[in-house]
Image: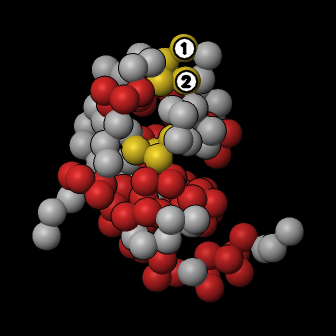
Amino acid sequence: MADPIKIADKNKDFFQLVYEVVKLIPHGRVTSYGAIAGYLGSKRGARMVGWAMNNCLKHKSDLPAHRVVNRNGLLSGKSHFATMDTMQDRLEAEGIKIKENQILEFDQHFWNPMKEISF
């Protein structure tokens, strides 16, 4: 397995682009790793977005990283937060209901950067 620090250094520019998209996710909405990757022109880059999100939790506490979930609405990144409940607690504080680590009515909360970000 590759060293996360080397991955972060090598992909610094991509990671920064990911963070810029994450900053735009509105309160009470979520998006997926794949949706961010697709928006950035890397349809198969969901895993790289995941690495960026894991890296940001160590360095960029102001990012709403809790709003990035997997394509099925599962809180797949919850183990990277301060506690196993942090991600769910933050989402629930924004009015998102979760059951068994999955966002209920995911399609209603989903924010698609391809449709929502305009230049």
What amino acid is found at the position of numbered circle 1 in the picture? Lys
Task: State the quadrant of the N terminus.
Answer: bottom right
In the picture, residue 26 is in which quadrant? top left
Q: Which residue is mark 2?
A: 102
Q: Which residue is mark 1?
A: 99
Is residue 20 something that shows in the picture? yes
Mark 2 to mark 1 CA distance (whole Å): 5 Å
Q: Position of residue 7 (x, y in %)?
A: 68, 77
Image side of residue 87 versus residue 17, left or right? right
The residue closer to the viewer here, 59 or 74, is 74
| Labelled pair 2, 1 in contact (Cβ < 8 Å) | yes
**SS label for mark 2:** strand
Residue placed at 63% from the left, 60% from the top?
47
Q: Residue furthest bottom?
A: 10
Q: Position of residue 111 (x, y in %)?
A: 31, 43
Q: Position of residue 24 (x, y in %)?
A: 26, 54
Image side of residue 106 versus residue 94, left or right? right
Render colour scheme: secondary structure
